[in-house]
Image (cartoon, grey):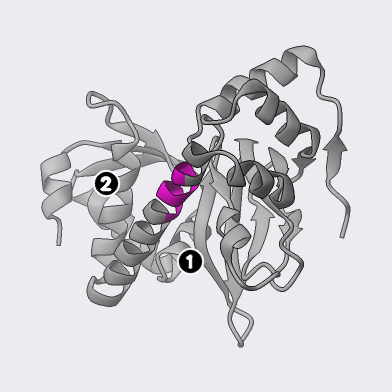
Amino acid sequence: MNAPLILREPGKVLHRVHHQILRGHHLFEPLNEQELDELMASSQLLSIDKGEPLFRQGEPADAFYFVIAGAVKIYRLTPDGQEKVFEVISERQTFAEAMMLMDTPNYVACAEAVCPTQLYRVSNATYMRLLRGNSRLTFALLGKLCVRLHQRVNEIETLSLKNATHRVVRYLLTQLMHLSSTDSCFELPMAKQLIAGHLSIQPETFSRIIRRLIDEKIITQDGRQIVILDRLRLEQFE
């Protein structure tokens, strides 16, 4: 396994830009400048290529991550060697922060870049030290974990009660929600194999459902580019 490229001194301009980006995330917004500088001093800026792992299940969990650009998949391997993707983390999102508060000292899943990715590796020890002296930071972390729990409960309900078509339709509608109210075009954030794995369906099933939506003139597709032609029909599609 090749070690990720570590950029220890990103430069003053880049440093300021990254500080502004971090400030936009609620896990870092409550920090004052001195606290943020202390956290960044113990963090590492990483640049990794597609397919490079950040950590494996069972490895010591001594850090969490903030994605500057790119994307990372969180997954586990089933006993028969199949890969189950839980989530794909995109830019300006964090992952593995829950490990700071768990009894286990090790990561419970694997993380791997799905494209060239730049991200910060943030020290759990430093963040926890800051957390003990900053109540706003404590509530920010609690809020983040509550959102993640709500997302997992919704996913469990969807995977348990809904069929494959509902899962794909919901996924497309979720992507659409990230856009402004007037936009109807977006790019799928990952390959169909990864999306299918995330939805617990076969890639062929995902492609077949997308083809049905195209044939019904509900969407169009050009590579990863999706255009929603009729949102109401998509919401009602069976």
Q: Residue 197 carries which label?
A: 1
Residue 15: % across, % down: 73, 20
Q: Does the magenta stretch include residue 141?
A: yes
Residue 213 higher or lower than 69, as above or below: below
CA separation in Å, label 1 and label 2: 18 Å
Is residue 211 in view? no
Q: Give neighbour class at mark 1: few <14, some 14-19, many 20+ (Cα, 10 Å).
A: some
Residue 149: % across, % down: 39, 61
Q: Residue 173 carries which label?
A: 2
* Residue 192 placement, left or right of 33: left
Is residue 87 in view? yes
Residue 92: % across, % down: 54, 35
Q: Give neighbour class at mark 2: few <14, some 14-19, many 20+ (Cα, 10 Å).
A: some
Quadrant (top left/top right/bottom left/bottom right) for the C terminus = bottom left
Residue 104 higher or lower than 206, as above or below: below
Secondary structure state at the residue bearing disc 2? helix
Using the image as rendered, state which of residue 19 and residue 219 is in the foreground: 19
**Figure label count:** 2
Residue 188: % across, % down: 44, 43
Q: Which residue type carries mark 1?
A: Gly
Give the residue displayed 58% in from the left and 55% down from the top.
73
Give the residue displayed 46% in from the left and 63% down from the top.
198
Give the residue displayed 44% in from the left and 51% down from the top.
142
Secondary structure state at the residue bearing disc 1? helix
Taking the view exactly as shown, the residue that stands out farthest to the top is 13
Q: Do the residues labelled 1 and 2 touch (CB within 8 Å)?
A: no
Residue 153 higher or lower than 170, as above or below: below
Magenta segment, which residues?
139-145
Q: Which residue type carries mark 2?
A: Leu
* Residue 175 placement, left or right of 53: left
* Residue 47 placement, left or right of 94: right
